[in-house]
Image (cartoon, rainbow, N blue to C red):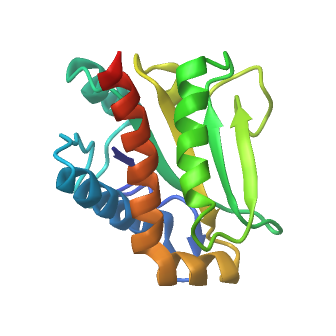
Amino acid sequence: MIAGHGGEDVGAILGKRYEKNDTLEIAKLIEKNLKKQNIKVIMTRNKDRDVSLEQRCKIANQKKAKIFVSIHRNSANIGNGVEIWCNSQKREADTKLANAIMSKLETTKIQQNRGIKYGTIEGENGDYYVLKNTNMPSCLIELGFISNKQDNKLLDDYKNEYAKAIADGIMEMVKEAIKK
């Protein structure tokens, strides 16, 4: 489980609200939900510290993680809602993971489903580092816009529901892997 940013890398900012804090809080809640279901969770950070993108991938790959999920918050002058990014190669397992998580998030109080996207915000010809350099099904969740007051209110009010929904989406993939 990856809580985006950390330490000196605060991520997106709105006043005194930092992406690094939101992502760590949600990641810990997801971890708690998964542990209740006897799932071993590898956190690349469990406190406010710097962890490079390379280190995050190395941890997941060396520990032979089965699934890699990176939690983030979006930011823009306009925009709201949740989107999930996958590798530009459109790998089936990545897409299944993203769809499983998004379908669960849709049952909560998200402002908008912005869909499953591939590549990066610049286009489908590149990938976010953590999606390109991990060896397991992976996705990067943009859990609402930190720059949108309604998305922040929804995150604050429904963080436990969001975390459970993400954990349930991950569990769907875990159960499918066990069947094989």
Residues 65 and 101: in front is: 101
Residues 122 and 27: in front is: 27
Q: Is residue 81 above or below residue 84?
A: below
- Residue at 25 percent across and 45 percent down: it is 43
- Residue at 35 percent across and 15 percent down: it is 180
Residues 65 and 9: in front is: 65
- Residue at 19 percent across and 52 percent down: it is 35
Q: Is residue 153 above or below residue 110?
A: below
Q: Which quarter of the figure has residue 67?
A: top left
Question: As drawn, is 35 to the left or to the right of 103?
Answer: left
Residue 5 seen in the current view: no
Q: Which quarter of the figure has residue 100?
A: top right
State the image coordinates of residue 71 (x, y, percent, origin top left): 47, 51
The image quadrant where one finds the N terminus is: top left
Question: As drawn, is 89 to the left or to the right of 159?
Answer: right
State the image coordinates of residue 28 (x, y, percent, origin top left): 28, 60
- Residue at 50 percent across and 84 percent down: it is 157
Residue 133 seen in the current view: yes
State the image coordinates of residue 16 (x, y, percent, origin top left): 50, 82
State the image coordinates of residue 137 (x, y, percent, origin top left): 46, 25
Q: Is residue 136 above or below residue 11?
A: above
Label count reads 0
